Image: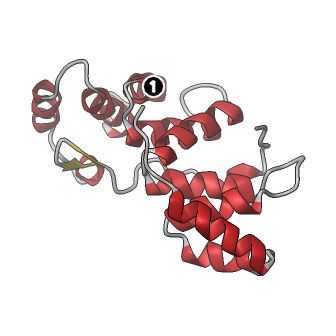
Amino acid sequence: MRIGKPFLIIAGLSLLTGCEAQHVTFNDFHHGMGQEKVSRLIGQANPDSGEHFLLMGALYQVDRTVKDLTQTRHYYRLAAERGNAKAQYFLGKMLLAGKGGPRDYDEAFRWFGQAAEQGNREAQIQVGMIYYRILDAPPDYMNAYKWLTLGGARDKVDRLETEMTSQQILQAQQLARNWKPKTF
C-alpha cells in the first residue's frame, strides 16, 4: 500500500508516549532518570532481546549527552526485528517522519501493521487512520473501522460511521470481533 506525505499531518509526529519496557516507562527518560539507572536496566536485559534494543533506542533518543536519532532508529529496528511491538510502532513513527534517516511511508506502514497485529493500540490507530485516509485510492472503511475500533479510537470510529452504510458497519464490527493478536 502506498501512502503519501499529507498523511504525516494525520499521523502526528510524537515518538515517545506511554511505553513500558523492563518495568520502566519512557516518561522516566524524560523526567531525569539517571544515566546509571538506564545503564543498569540495559545491562539487566537479555543483550539480544527486543527490550534491550528498545531501551538502547530510547536512550539515544532522549538522553542529551548521547542523543543520536540515527542510532535510535538503528536500535528500534533491531528491537522491531525481534518482534517488539513497541519498537515496531516507534520505528514506524520515525520512518513516517524521516527521523534518523529518510522517510519511507511503505516501510512505516509495514512496521505499524506488525505492531497493530500484536495488539499495540497506538499502532492500531495509525493503521486505521492510514486505511481511512489512503492517498491515491478510495478509503478502506472496513479495515479503518476494524483497526480504529481495536485501538479504542471511539471518536474516530463515530466520525467514520457517518460515511459508512449500516451493512458496512455490521461487517466491520464483525471483523473487529474476529480479530486475534499475532506474534512475530
48 w.r.t. 155: above or below: above
Say whether residue 118 is left or right of residue 49.
right
The residue that appears at 63% across and 74% down in the rendered structure is: 157
26 w.r.t. 146: above or below: above
Say whether residue 89 is left or right of residue 62.
right
Colour scheme of this structure image?
Answer: secondary structure
Say whether residue 141 is left or right of residue 118.
right
The residue that appears at 57% across and 50% down in the rendered structure is: 13
Please provide percent x and percent y for residue 123.
51, 50
The residue that appears at 48% across and 23% down in the rendered structure is: 70
Q: For the C terminus, which image quadrant?
A: top left
Where is residue 174, by image quadrant?
bottom right
Which class describes the residues within 10 Å of circle 1: few (<14), some (14-19), or many (20+)?
A: many
Please provide percent x and percent y for residue 95.
60, 34
**Amino acid type assigned to the residue bearing label 1 in the image:** Arg
Badge 1 is on which residue? 77
- Front residue of this view, candidates 18 and 127: 127
Please provide percent x and percent y for residue 93.
55, 42
Tell me, yes or no, if residue 9 can be seen here: no
Q: For the N terminus, which image quadrant?
A: top right
Tell me, yes or no, if residue 156 can be seen here: yes
The residue that appears at 59% across and 78% down in the rendered structure is: 155
Say whether residue 20 is left or right of residue 81.
left
- Front residue of this view, candidates 91 and 67: 91
In this figure, what is the number of numbered marks? 1
Where is residue 182, by image quadrant?
top left
Please provide percent x and percent y for residue 102.
65, 26
